[in-house]
Image: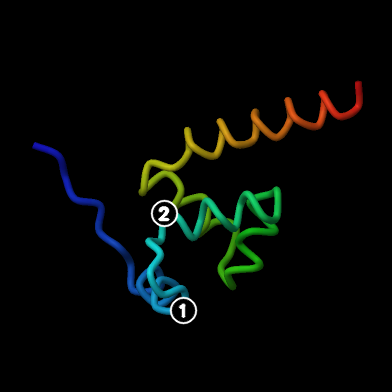
């Protein structure tokens, strides 16, 4: 049986500020847009520690790692 990932009150507030998007998508979009966890957290108005805790709580660590690798490979191809 899988355990449902409970959202914190702050997660729910951030979702309210981004209608139609889940907290998972909001975090991924912020990371993709800003390029670092620190900048993404700052843009969302949370601490980097909260961003990282949520990333692991929601199972987004692998998705962000893949996105980072994809961006790194794209920038290397542009330099060539």
The residue indicated by pointer 2 is 24
The residue indicated by pointer 1 is 17
- Kindly identify the residue that appears in the image at 42 percent across and 44 percent down: 56
Left or right placement of residue 50 versus residue 15 in this view: right
Q: Give the residue at the far top of this rendering.
A: 80
Q: Is residue 41 above or below residue 78?
A: below
What colour-coding does the image apply? rainbow
Residue placed most toward the observer, 44 or 48: 44
Q: Is residue 10 above or below residue 22?
A: below
- Give the mark nearest the N terminus, 1 or 2: 1
User: Quick one: SS at disc 2?
Assistant: helix
Across and down, in percent, residue 64 comes to 54, 39
Instruction: Tell me whether circle 1 and circle 2 mark residues in contact (CB < 8 Å).
Output: no
Across and down, in percent, residue 54 comes to 43, 54
Left or right placement of residue 26 versus residue 11 in this view: right
- Kindly identify the residue that appears in the image at 91 percent across and 27 percent down: 79
User: Quick one: SS at disc 1?
Assistant: helix
Residue placed most toward the observer, 37 or 72: 72
Image quarter where the N terminus lies is: top left
- Kindly identify the residue that appears in the image at 40 percent across and 73 percent down: 10
Residue placed most toward the observer, 18 or 2: 18
Number of other residues with Cα within 10 Å of mark 1, as a class: few under 14, some 14 to 19, many 20 or more:
few
Image quarter where the C terminus lies is: top right
Q: How far apart are the two marked residues, 1 and 2, measured between alpha carbons?
A: 14 Å
Q: Quadrant of residue 74?
A: top right
Across and down, in percent, residue 47 comes to 58, 64
Q: Give the residue at the far right of this rendering.
A: 80
Which numbered disc covers residue 77? none
Number of other residues with Cα within 10 Å of mark 2, as a class: few under 14, some 14 to 19, many 20 or more:
some
């Amino acid at each position: 049986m899988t355990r449902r990932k409970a959202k914190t009150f702050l997660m729910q507030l951030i979702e309210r500020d981004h209608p139609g998007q889940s907290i998972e998508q909001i975090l991924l979009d912020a990371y993709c847009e800003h390029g670092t966890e620190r900048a993404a957290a700052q843009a969302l108005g949370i601490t980097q520690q909260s961003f990282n805790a949520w990333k692991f709580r929601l199972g987004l660590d692998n998705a962000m790692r893949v996105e980072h690798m994809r961006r790194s490979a794209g920038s290397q191809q542009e330099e060539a």
